[in-house]
Amino acid sequence: MNIGSIVRSANAFGADTVHIVGRRRWNKRGAMVTDRYQHVEHREDVAALVAWAHEQSVPIIAIDNVPGCVPMEMFDWPERCVMLFGQEGPGLSQEAIDAAEAVVEITQYGSTRSINASAAAAVTMYSWVLQHSPLRPR
Ligand SMILES: C[S@@+](CC[C@H](N)C(=O)[O-])C[C@H]1O[C@@H](n2cnc3c(N)ncnc32)[C@H](O)[C@@H]1O
C-alpha cells in the first residue's frame, strides 16, 4: 500500500519516475489508478539504482532519521535528484545510506520514532516543491 500511495503522491507533485527497488510485485490499490500515468520502473537492488543514478548524473538523497542526518528545514534540494525511502520496519539499509550524497530527516516533535513511509514521501516531495515551484518568485 505504501508503494501505491507513493506513486500517487509522485504523480501529484510532478516527479518524473518512481523506481521500485526489489520485488516486482506491489499492491496497486494505493495508487488509485495514477500508475497508468506515472512512470514506474523497477531496479533489482540498491546497486542497480545507484548505477542508474550515476549514469544519469542524478544525486541520491536518502530520506531517513538516522544519526548524522540533516533536518529537512535546513536542506537545499537539488533540482534533479533521486529521493530514496526505506521500508517500514528496517528503514534504509546501510548500503542505501552509503550511496547517498546526503541523508535528510523530517523533523518530528512527538514521541513516535518515525512516520509512515508514504507519509514521509509526501512530505519530502512537497518540501522539494516549496523550493522549486514555478509559482515561487525568483
Ligand atoms: C517507518 S520508517 C522506519 C525506519 C526508521 N529509521 C525508524 O527508526 O523507525 C520507514 C521509512 O519512512 C521514512 N521515514 C519515516 N519517518 C521519517 C522521518 N522522520 N524522517 C525521514 N524519513 C522518515 C524513511 O524513508 C524510512 O526508511
Image (tube, grey):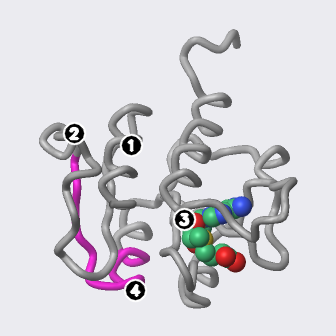
> Which residue bears the numbered disc 3?
60
Q: Is 26 in the magenta?
A: no
Under circle 1, the secondary element is: helix
Tag 1 near tag 2, CB within 8 Å? yes
Residue 44 place in picture, x, y as percent: 26, 83
Picture disc at residue 47: 4
Q: CA distance from mark 3 to mark 4?
A: 12 Å
Amino acid type assigned to the residue bearing label 3 in the image: Ile
Please determine whether, in this image, residue 73 is positioned above or below residue 26.
above
Quadrant of the snapshot with the N terminus: bottom left
Q: Is residue 102 left or right of residue 119?
A: right
Please determine whether, in this image, residue 58 is positioned above or below residue 101.
above
Picture disc at residue 10: 1
Q: Nearer the viewer, mark 4 or mark 2?
A: 2
Among the two numbered marks 4 and 2 on one chain, the one whose residue lies closer to the N terminus: 2
How dense is the environment of label 4, judged by Cα within 10 Å: few (below 14), some, or many (20 and up)? Answer: some
